Image (cartoon, helix red, strand yellow):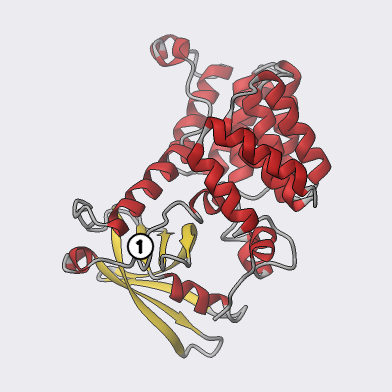
Amino acid sequence: MVELGRHARLRGVWGNPCGFKSRLRHHIFSPPRIFLMLTFFFMVSAADAKLSDFLLKQKEAVVVVSVNDRGGKEVASEKGVVIAQDGIIVTSSRVILKWLEETENTLTVHTENGSYPLDSLISYNSKLNITLIKIGSTGLPAARLDSGDAATGYILRSLEIYRKTMRRAAPVPENIAGNVKHIQEDSAESYFKRGYANETEERYAEAIDAYRQAIKMRPDYMEAYINLGIMYYRLGRYHEAIEAYQQALKRDPLSPSILNKLGTIYLILGEYAITTDAFRNALSSNPQNPETHYHLGIAYFLDGNKDAALEEYILLHRLDQRLAENLFDLMYR
């Protein structure tokens, strides 16, 4: 098994070649998965957490997660449990590590209705041996999550943060949502609404087309630029996302939300100087934002400025002790 040091782990998560394999960087750790990986890595301190008997006894929700080598031979297999009907599964972190051992290994989830490749990694915690993954299937029978044990608590918190993060697109403005009947079919607002509808259904290519059409009809449409950036971000098209966010920033130069989004992308790309500038600018407008301090601390640490990273930890500890401990774990444990 591969045991990563904290610096290698951090660099691997953010896309440096000395971390995880290039396949993992470009596929599994594409946004928003990178942010989620960092957020979840050390969320729970309970020891020896694993899939509970309570979950595994719900046999209708149990699946098999297998790893095959380049020749098709199975080299690892673990049980998993469907915990949400949109294809979210909890399984053992060991099977993920086995999958990572060889670039050409494949990971497949086998259900009663068929077999599915891994779509995305939602959370990964080797310390607890619990990983949440997503496959491209819906309507699966899901287990109940009401046992109250440590593993279930971790799963519920992971799901909650995942759902919140996936909803961070700009919502349909109230004046649009409340007056749908009065929107012209070919107006900028109608295209924005179509983009938002496609986005909620995870039809990102269609959402991009709709947002771009909204911008074409209304070049100052800041919300459309933001959501367009988010779509590119989710597809791993970082430079296009940067361009969209920069256009939004022209309309609101001090927006902490846009600056944070830009900072996150530059962090992924390893542009640490630009990253820290973006996060510092975001803090100038909203100095009490704990997530900004958290990501700024990571940027400082990866850039080799451990003193500044420690200062961010001290500031963050006054704002959000949980995030502060996460940052400390990533840097020093």
Query: Where 14 sits versus 107, above or below?
Result: above
Q: In which quadrant of the rendered view does residue 104 lie?
A: bottom right
- Tell me if residue 28 comes above or below residue 237 in the rendering: below
Would you say 139 lies left or right of 183 here?
left
Residue at 43 percent across and 84 percent down: it is: 76
Residue 241 appears in the rendering: no
How many marks can you see?
1
Instruction: Single out the residue that lies furthest toward the right.
Output: 273
Residue at image coords 56%, 42%: 324
Three-letter residue code for mark 1: Val
Q: Residues within 10 Å of mark 1 (few under 14, many from 20)?
A: many
Q: Where does residue 67 sit, x and y in percent of width and height?
A: 46, 80
Image point (53%, 26%), residue name: 170
Residue 176 seen from this side: yes
> Residue 204 at x, y = what percent?
54, 43
x%, y% of residue 207? 54, 36
Q: Nearer the viewer, residue 61 or 6?
A: 6
**Depth check: 228 or 324 in front?**
324
Mark 1 falls on what kind of element? strand
Residue at left offset 36%, top offset 68%:
48
Does 112 sit left or right of 3 as displayed? Answer: left
List the residue tagged with mark 1: 90
Quadrant of the image occupied by residue 226 = top right
Q: Quadrant of the N terminus?
A: bottom right
Horizontal arrangement in the rendering, residue 19 relative to residue 108 (left or right): right
In this rendering, the answer to whether 301 lies above or below 323 is below
Residue 301: where, in percent of width, then height?
73, 50
Quadrant of the frame with the C terminus? bottom right
